[in-house]
Amino acid sequence: MPMKPIFAILIFILIGFPSYALADSGYEYQLYKNHENHGIVVFPKSRIFKELDSYLVSIPFESTDSGKAVMRHGSKNENATYMMPLDIQKKHSIEKFIVIQIISEKSMLVGVYDPEWGLTLPSTIFELETVKKNIPKTLNVFRGSNRQKQTRLRQERIPANLNF
């Protein structure tokens, strides 16, 4: 057998295998939603700790759905992370949301999805206190100029950009 077809098959397998492995993550997500149809997707669900859950419920988001996390790209086909499936996003009429990947009780990666901006995934690892400060700021950016719905922050200006 000539070497070129074997090499091509080997490359195809090596390229295809990692994407197959990523498609079946084994991660479960937990979706929290507020009355404005903004969402917070947290994964893996098994790592959600009481202080994070209590904070999300207090701002107020309610736990609405959970299931198997899927790898998705942003609206501009940029970046990718695990999150809720698209049909769940549509079912709950969520256009803008925050994605939190729990690494440990003290560290998380946070991304922001907005159909206009796409999926923003900074590589910075955040602690809970920083996440608590930035979620209200991000929600205010989601709301835009609708000042009636702004989340009040103690002596802080509302940012013009996303904080995560």
Image: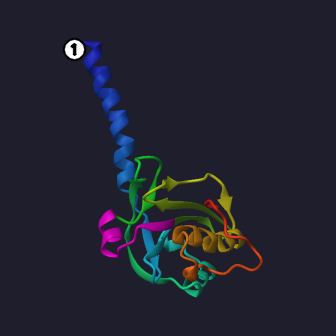
Q: Residue 162's quadrant in the figure?
A: bottom right
Q: Quadrant of the N terminus?
A: top left
Q: Residue 35's quadrant in the figure?
A: bottom left
- Classify 36 as above or below 121: below
At 55% from the left and 81% from the top, the residue drawn is 149
Q: Position of residue 14 (x, y in %)?
A: 37, 34
* Count of labels in the image: 1
At 51% from the left and 83% from the top, the residue drawn is 61
Q: Is residue 1 left or right of residue 128?
A: left
Q: Magenta part of the protein: which range?
A: 86-98
Q: Quadrant of the C terminus?
A: bottom right
Q: Is residue 71 left or right of residue 55?
A: left
Q: Is residue 33 left or right of residue 54?
A: left
Please state which amino acid type lies under the numbered disc 1. Met
Q: Which residue is mark 1?
A: 1
Residue lying at the far left of the rendered structure: 1
- Classify 124 as above or below 66: above
